Image: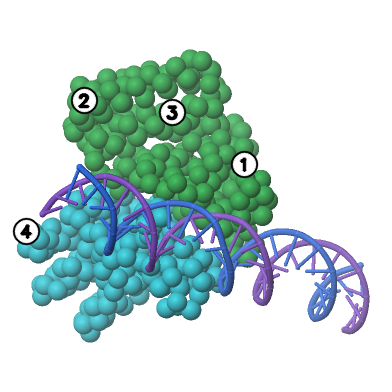
Chain colours: A cyan, B green, C purple, D blue
Amino acid sequence: MEPALAKPLVRTMSAQLTALVRARIVSGAYAPGSALLQDALAAEFGVSKIPVREALLQLRGEGLVEVFAHRGFQVRALSGAEAQEIFRLRLALEPGAIAHGAALADEAERSAAEAACRELREALAAGRLEEAGDLNRAFHLSLVLPARQPLTAEVLDRLLTLAQRYVRLHLQPRGRASRAGREHEALLAAWLRGESHRLTELARAHIESTHADLARALALAAP
Amino acid sequence: MEPALAKPLVRTMSAQLTALVRARIVSGAYAPGSALLQDALAAEFGVSKIPVREALLQLRGEGLVEVFAHRGFQVRALSGAEAQEIFRLRLALEPGAIAHGAALADEAERSAAEAACRELREALAAGRLEEAGDLNRAFHLSLVLPARQPLTAEVLDRLLTLAQRYVRLHLQPRGRASRAGREHEALLAAWLRGESHRLTELARAHIESTHADLARALALAAP
DNA sequence: TGTAGGTATATCGTATACGATCTGGCCATC
DNA sequence: GATGGCCAGATCGTATACGATATACCTACA
């Protein structure tokens, strides 16, 4: 994978296509359940089917795409049950990882986290909701990466990416953005101070409040 | 992915190759760090490079293979740090998932878990260590699958697969197998009785003891 | 009129072929 | 004698091409 950890492989077509198609799925440009035709995508991007297939298979591994042998690929459908799982898994992993990150962060990583928080705040203030999803993920990751646990970071990165499609659904509510913003500031402050216990508590509360907002939005949207 | 959840896709070459190469990596037939040449593998299996590439990319997503653009694939190296992470993640996820599974298992799933435990025990008793790794993973999964949390099951399946290469390293010690066997029996008994609290405790203890044995073996093996 | 079977078409999965990229060694230069 | 650039070989990544598979429609028949 590499939703955001992408260091290698950016020199190949399939890697670029992976990033592009992932962005379109996460942003909703490719709707849940819609078909992803290899020939059509290849023609659209001006490449052959092979890098397209490799990209789609990669995204299948990330849980964004579903594949049916000899019948094609489609964007994975959303479901309340999956959302439950994503947030349950994040609750189990993220608070601890953030606390670890706080304990081990060096100066560069600390200012990177501050920068990520600021960029997210500014994007929300400017109403750039399109960027907000990626910036939110980047901020959360910036708190985790200093823990130097690459496998944990990768799992969390995937979960954050999966969560994005759901979070998008309830970003509209007026109050949501400002509350999330306050929670982010508090989280960052405790992280910078290394208040381990308070930090895990804040992280837990933030994930839970996000999930609660989402559950409410889903309940309103779907009968 | 589908180390063991493989329902679809078994009708394609790349899916079969994925399973085959995965088995060879997990069993140690392809040693950590060794190169995986596309042309050589294609020739060996009598297919073209394309399904080979797809299989290797899939295994990269599972964390068993590493890829360097334009330089090829290799079996991922082992490291004590990664082992730490794997077991830390399992500790965070598996006890809860097993407890959920116990609460929701139907009759068929209960006997499937019993069967998986028995097969593992018999393989160990017969000294069939090659099969033991897969059977151990299957047993752990059989406790989790009834929770009907596919994403959680997939994450755990991947972690169990990653763990296999490390566990193999310390399966030799005489006492290990019998202690693991006792732990499995106790785990299964509590699971069947639905003793949620005791169950999570047993699961935690089992994962920790496996990890402790491994850490000791690694300390002995590597300076 | 409803259902089973066969055929056409679209799409997939893989083989073949080829240009692109990397590595290692040789030679020129400092 | 060490350093830096060039060349050859091997390997990779992708385009093209083709056989394989599934779906949908259409026909024949109960």
Amino acid type assigned to the residue bearing label 4 in the image: Pro
Q: Which mark is residue B183?
A: none
The mark lying in front, picked from 2 and 3, is: 2
Q: Is residue C26 above or below residue A57?
A: below
Q: Image check: B155 left or right of B161?
A: left
User: Mark 3 or mark 2, which is nearer the start of the sequence?
Assistant: 2
Image point (59%, 31%), residue name: B220
Amino acid type assigned to the residue bearing label 3 in the image: Leu
Q: Can marks 2 and 1 be said to lie on one chain?
A: yes
Q: Residues within 10 Å of mark 2 (few under 14, many from 20)?
A: few
Q: Quadrant of the C terminus of chain A?
A: bottom left
The mark lying in front, picked from 2 and 1, is: 2
Q: CA distance from mark 1 to mark 3?
A: 20 Å
Q: Which residue is mark 3?
A: B135
Asked if the residues shown at circle 2 and circle 4 are in contact, with their CB atoms under 8 angstroms apart, the answer is no
Q: CA distance from mark 3 to mark 4?
A: 42 Å
Location of residue C20 in the rendering, given as x and y in whole percent from the top left corner: 65, 75
Location of residue B110 in the rendering, given as x and y in whole percent from the top left corner: 25, 25
Q: Which residue is mark 4?
A: A223
Q: Residues within 10 Å of mark 4 (few under 14, many from 20)?
A: few
Q: Residues within 10 Å of mark 1 (few under 14, many from 20)?
A: some
Q: Can marks 4 and 1 be said to lie on one chain?
A: no
Q: CA distance from mark 2 to mark 4?
A: 32 Å
Image point (20%, 29%), residue name: B106
- Label 1 is found on which chain of the structure? B
Secondary structure at numbered mark 3 = helix
Asked if the residues shown at circle 1 and circle 3 are in contact, with their CB atoms under 8 angstroms apart, the answer is no
Amino acid type assigned to the residue bearing label 2 in the image: Glu
Image point (28%, 66%), residue name: A34
Q: Which residue is mark 2?
A: B107
Q: CA distance from mark 2 to mark 1?
A: 39 Å
